[in-house]
Amino acid sequence: MLELKNVSLRLPDQKEILRNVNLKIDDGKFVVVTGPNGGGKTTLAKVVSGIETPTAGAVFLDGCEITNMGITQRARFGICYAFQQPVRFKGITVRDLLELAAGKKLREKELCNYLMEVGLCAQNYTEREIDASLSGGEIKRIEIAAALARDARITIFDEPEAGIDLWSFNSLIDVFKGLRKKGRSVLVISHQERILAIADEIVVVAEGEIRHHGPKAEIFPMLLGEQKQIFCPQQEGRL
């Protein structure tokens, strides 16, 4: 179980990004974090992954405090983070990235399976460099394939739908369902209704605080109702 206790994060200019956040994520849960832009969603994900260190409060994994562990140490504990804007690595191939994520050499069939899950043909991609020749959608799908190869206990996706087409989005939904079937915990930052609709739990973050957290059956209807415009106005298909 992952737990945040009274977590706050204040910038050097004293601006408070997170304020007294308390959150529990049980093993095997698919949790979607949503809310208005600039409300603290991505910062919350970065605190969980170890990219950001809270200025107050603590983070625990299975009762062990990991607050001061960085992203590499947390990766060893089974926490994986997929960036909203994936990094490009000139000189590193897709094969290299997937094998680094898996921590071992991968058979051709394994490489093919990971790439097929995100809608890519292994024959066309395994030896390609992760550079500017890849589109934003391609690099996004490759990063998701790397997250699958990592097979982490907890995988965090920051707006994974950004920059991908409808066909790839359908594959993305299948990826989330597959991770849940395997008993992995998934934390997704998203406004997309179709992603929210398959969540176990929904967390609404606004102005650095958790405003709502509960089962999808409780929170989702509220987001679709009268308060929809509060969270993300004028964005069709998004909350």
Image (tube, rainbow, N blue to C red):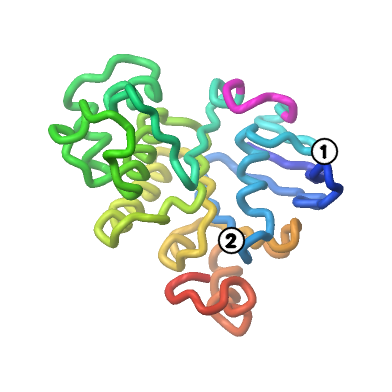
Question: In the shown orientation, is residue 71 left or right of residue 212?
Answer: left
**Is 62 in front, or is 71?**
71
Residue labelled with disc 2: 34
Question: Residue at point 29% right, 52% down?
Answer: 171
**Which stretch is magenta?**
67-73
User: Crowding at label 2, few (<14), some or many (≥20) Cα neighbours within 10 Å?
Assistant: many
Q: Is residue 61 above or below residue 221?
A: above
Q: What residue is shown at x 28% (from left), y 44% (from top)? A: 118
Residue 33, given in percent of the width and then of the height, sits at 58, 56
| Residue found at the far bottom of this picture | 226
Judged from the image, the secondary structure of the residue bearing numbered disc 1 is: loop
Magenta segment includes 46: no
Q: Nearer the viewer, residue 220 or 43?
A: 43
Q: Which mark is residue 55?
A: 1
Q: Quadrant of residue 166?
A: bottom left
Residue depicted at x 29% and y 59%:
165
71 is within the stretch colored magenta: yes
Gap in Å between the C-alphas at discs 2 and 1?
Answer: 23 Å
Q: Residues within 10 Å of mark 1 (few under 14, many from 20)?
A: some
Is residue 115 or residue 165 the one in the foreground?
165
